[in-house]
Structures are given as C-alpha cells and as structure tokens.
Image: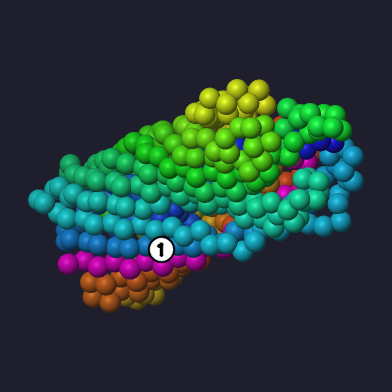
Amino acid sequence: MNKRILGMLVALFLIPSMVLANGFNLNGLGSRAQGMGGAFVGIANDFSAVFWNPAGAAGFRRTTFGFFATDLIPRGTYQPGDIGSIPENPPFVAKTKTSHYLGFLAGYYKPVSSKVVVGLGIGTPSGFGTRWDGADFAYLTTGTTYDWSSRIGVFSFSPMVAVKLSEVISVGAAINLDYGNFNLKMPAGFSSWPVISIDGEVAVDLGQYEENMNGWGLGATFGILVKPANELSLGLTVRTPSTIVFDGTARMSNLSLYDFPGSSTLERKITRPLWIAGGVAFRPVPRLLLSADAHWTQWSKLDVIRTEFMDARWRPFTAAEERDIRVLDWKDALQVRFGAEVALNATTALRAGYYYDPAPGPLETLNVLLPSHTFHALSVGFGKTLGGLQLDFGLEYLAGSSRTSSFASADAMPGTYGMHIVVPTASVSYTF
C-alpha cells in the first residue's frame, strides 16, 4: 500500500506548479466581453482590447481608462476510487474549501494621431488554485492531516500600439512581460529510501511539503480587425508562448531523518502556450449585436515539466524518486464561444453568452490538484452609460462535466471528480 500511496503523492508533489498551464487561464478579462461569453475578438472596442485584440484600440478617438475586477469561486468534489488495500469508494466525498481567486485588468489608451493609439494594460491572464480539507485525505497519509492548497497567479504588463491602416483594416501589437507566482502546501509523501532503526527498515513519511516560487517571462500579442461594413467586423488574435522561469524555495518537514537540509532552492520553466483566436460580430438590426469566436490553445506543448532542485543532497534524492519530472500528456483544445448584446436604449444594454471549454488533460493524469474538466459556461451581463462613464457587470457559471478515472499510478488518482465555478465581475471605464 505504501508504494501505491507514494506513487500518487510523488505525482501530486509537482502538480500545482502546472496550474498556470493546464487550462486554468482566466477565460476572459472585461465585464462586457465576459457577459457576451468571451466572444469578443471581432469586437474589442473597449478598454479590454489589449487582452482580446489590440487592433480594436485603433478606433479610440479619446483617451480611455478602465478597470475590471473578477472573483473566481470554484467548488470541487472528489469521490475516491479503488487504490489497492484502501477500500473502494470510501464513505465520503471530499470537497474543496470555499476560496476566492481574484483577477483584474487595468487599461489606459491615448490617441497620438488620427491613426495611431498607444496604451498599457496590466492584468491577470491566469489565476486559480485549490484548497482541500486535509482531513479528507488522511487515509492516504496513515491518518496524518496535512495542508493541501495552492494559489497561483500570472500578472502581465503589456505596452501596446494600434494603427488604423484604412477605414476597413486596423492592426495592433502588445509586448507581454509576465510575472508569475504561487504558494503550495501539501504532503511530501512516503520516501522509497528507508531508514534503519532498531525495528529494521522503516518507510519515511517526509511530512509537510511547501513551495514558494516566482519568475518572469516574455511574449507578445498581435491582432487584426477588419470591418468591411458597418454591420460586420472580423478579428484575429495571436498570443505567442511565454516561458516563465521560476525560482524559489521548497521545504520538506521530515528530511532531517536523513540528515538532509529541510529546504532547497529550485528552478522550473513553465510555458504559457500559443493561443490563436478568431471572431466575427454582426448587427442584424441596430440594437442587436451578435458575436461568435473560436479560441485554440496549443496545450500539447506541455507534455513534460521538469524541476531542478539546487541543493546537492536534494538533487540525487528527488531524481531517484522521480520527483523532478512530471508527465502531463495534454492535448490541444478548441473553445467555441457565442454572445449577444441588446441595447434597451442609448444608455442601457443587456448581454448573454455561452462557451464550450474542453479539458486538455486526459484521465491518465487526473488527480485532485489537477482537476481538468470540460466546462459548459453560461454568462449574463448588464451595462450602463453615464456620459463618459461606463459601468458593466457580469456573472458566469461554469458547469464542469463529471469525470471518472480508474487509473492509479504516479500520474493519476482513481475516483470521480466534479467541479463548478461561479465568476462575478465588474468594470468601470471613462473616456476623457
């Protein structure tokens, strides 16, 4: 039993470091866009343009500033499956603790000529985490309760420029300077290196594991917006990969049993993958705007993640137990999004949207700290204009499809997984 548990806990040892790149990117920034299901690449005509399509900012004729805030409130469940001598379907369902993962976007744009607009966006394109009740997983750790939590965020600083090439075509580009950080607490698991005592060889529980890391990466966003008619617009956005080089400190509370130091510095590279999105928007009547997007993410590039522990005694130890490598085997994914906006009058609008977000992770690598789900998302929104002031509010509900895995390995925990997420948002913007 200890070997089976060791395998699963070694896999979990690395999981939260992957959350930045496993489909947990925020599904959009800006309340108007999110109220329309994130089908905004072919529109991109408010302060969130730096995220959706920087070419949209070329249409700004006045200085514009906006701020967006969102709160991701996930709720995950896990019904354990059969893992050998541990009874099949233990009589409980583990649930994540209520947590709030905040995100934001601030955008500033200034026309410098009739055809050129410069701007700056600062926001959180990625941010999520999990927080479980450690008592629910004490059966995996011989009755000991450990902390199980992760909190991850990526902040992007994005200077940009947009140019109106003609009355029909606009282009834009942004540089994305990414800063990533996260905190992690979880059990380190049992070691395959026994210690010798008066009772013979004894398996070692390495105790509580903690990891704190941060790092920088660099990428870019390019966009084009085409308006062949007043009622029709088409957009295309490409966000290049950004490899964030993380460094920080890892700790294992019981390594003193081996006369090892309790902490080590470490390095890890995580790549935010290539993202390509296309969109179309159409006004069949003056008060109705319809939109549709397709967003493709190259998750397949994140097949293996490696960690380098810098301490001379940690390095051979973690390598021998394969704690320095994680196989993900994710697949590329295509999101499909639809949105609608109805103008009730010149100052008030209602919005609604839907999108389909398939899980990039296979069952073979599914576990509680990597809850990769297929989501069906519904959204609604409301907007109010007061002179140069624009107020927008939105609410998303992401229903995750239940997933049942029978895989018990170093990469997976068998059981049934559930997830849903509630996402309230608010935006305020002003044109000078």
Q: Residue at x 67, y 55 (%)?
A: 132
Seen as rendered, the residue at the extreme front is: 198
Q: Residue at x 64, y 37 (%)?
A: 256
The foreground one among 132 and 412 is 132
Which segment did they paint magenta?
Answer: 412-432
Q: Is residue 369 magenta?
A: no
Q: Is residue 422 magenta?
A: yes
Q: Position of residue 171 (x, y in %)?
A: 24, 41
User: Is residue 210 visible to us here?
Assistant: yes
Q: Is residue 184 above or below residue 102?
A: above
Task: Name the quadrant of the N terminus.
Answer: top right
Q: Is residue 222 above or below residue 107?
A: above
Q: Residue at x 49, y 28 (%)?
A: 310
Which residue lies under the disc numbered 1? Answer: 69
Amino acid type of the residue tagged 1 in the rendering: Ala
Q: Position of residue 322 (x, y in %)?
A: 65, 26
Q: Is residue 221 above or below residue 41?
A: above
Q: Position of residue 249 (x, y in %)?
A: 49, 40
Asked whether, in this view, residue 14 is left or right of residue 393, the answer is right
The foreground one among 344 and 310 is 310
